[in-house]
Image (cartoon, rainbow, N blue to C red):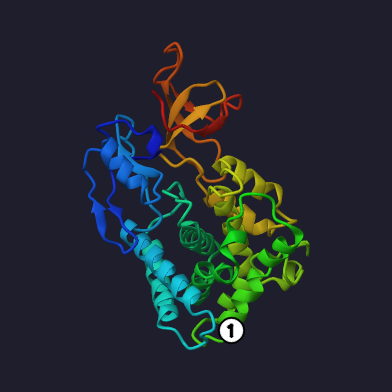
Amino acid sequence: MRIVPIYCIKDDFLLAKDIFDFDGRILLKQGNRLNKKTLDSIKLLGINCLNVVDQNSYIELENIIKPELKEKSLNLIKSTFGNLFSNKKSTKKSNDFQKILDLSEELIDDILNRNDILINLVDIKTLDNYTYEHSVNVAMLSLVIGLKLGLNREDLKQLCVGALLHDVGKMFIPTEILNKPSKLSQEEFKVIRSHPIRGYDYLKNIENIPLKSRLIVIEHHEKVNGCGYPLYKKNKEINILSKIVAIADVYDALTSNRPYRKPLSPNEALEFILGNAGSHFDFYLVKIFKCTIVPYPNGSLVKLNTGEIAIVKDNFNNFPLRPNIEIIKTSNNFNLGKKINLRENLSLVINEVAYNIL
């Protein structure tokens, strides 16, 4: 199975995973053969990538959580944020937020049932659903980091709730500012930077949201050197759960398509995180993140600096950008089928994920 942009999908590719609508109903079941008419209909939903099966799909991409649980998470976040957007002045205890607490327990249980999990966020991302997909991705990333850190169950729950709700304050920001494709004015930038306080002020009136979860909402843009916002807190003043979400938030944001920029590649995003360890991000947490992240999961197709196309065979802790690979396409068939350990062949570098190898 591979995740491939629709524009790279050829006729007769098999759909590898069910496609759901915004209410969680199956629109197209896995196993269906794809054609132009079907792909055009899918694009109308705002979906730009699909899980497909082709001749290069003999290695299965693993999920952090079960697909149906991720779909449930997306739908719950969308409905919760939608209800908040429709009734921003309500401060009553919300059944939606209790559902988020319950969902956090499910997410923790699902991840705990997996052995030595490595973070793989190669997944379908749509521009229209960015806020909801980002919230769920940040929660999954944060939970895996929290597990590696050895957090207890209660802290994991508060971490997950805070991660799911970290951007809730953006529901109070005008859409035309959030999705503005050009450079923000100073006043617009000031409005954007108000979202942590707006989210915190809203949640503090909802009694079933834990304290540390609310701290995540207001602190996830703070930096350990004190140059973050909105409170300019420094290292030890920032809750450790907020520090975890700060890393997860930036990594997923950098690898996502936004109206004002194209996504960075996984290795570029990871290098940004590593380069800002000790200034923007907690140094020790970045070290844990580096040991956990998998920019190129097993089964990914990648393009090397030589122009060759390879499939990723194995990943290793501490070497996220140097997996074992097998060459599957070259310009002259030289090296075809060759297995290479990138930890030992330092002249070879992965430039990007390869989608269309024809």
Residue at (54% x, 35% y) in the render: 322
Q: How many marks?
A: 1
Observer-nearest residue: 347 or 90? Answer: 90
Write down the quadrant of residue 103 in the picture. bottom left
Q: Which residue is mark 1?
A: 204
Q: Where does residue 88 sit, x and y in percent of width and height?
A: 53, 79
Left or right: residue 243 versus residue 113 is: right
Image quadrant holding the N terminus, namely: top left
Q: Nearer the viewer, residue 232 or 294?
A: 232
Q: Nearer the viewer, residue 347 or 116?
A: 347
Is residue 12 found left or right of 151 in the rendered image?
Answer: left
Q: Could you tell me which residue is drawn at 66 percent across and 64 percent down?
A: 192
Residue 113 in sight in this render: no
Q: Quadrant of the C terminus?
A: top left
Q: Is residue 181 above or below residue 326?
A: below
As drawn, 137 above or below 57: below
Q: Say which quarter of the image contains residue 350.
A: top right
Tell me where residue 266 appears, x and y as whole percent.
55, 43
| Whole-percent x, y for residue 65 in the image | 38, 58
| Residue 79 visible, this angle | yes
Position in image of residue 127 (x %, y %) = 48, 51
From the viewer's perspective, tell me whether residue 190 is left or right of residue 114: right
Which residue does the image show at 42% across and 20% down from the upper left? 329
Label 1: how many residues lie within 10 Å, few (<14), some (14-19) or many (20+)? some
Q: Is residue 104 above or below residue 1?
A: below
Q: Amino acid at mark 1?
A: Lys
To which quarter of the image does residue 288 belong? Answer: bottom right
SS type, badge 1: loop
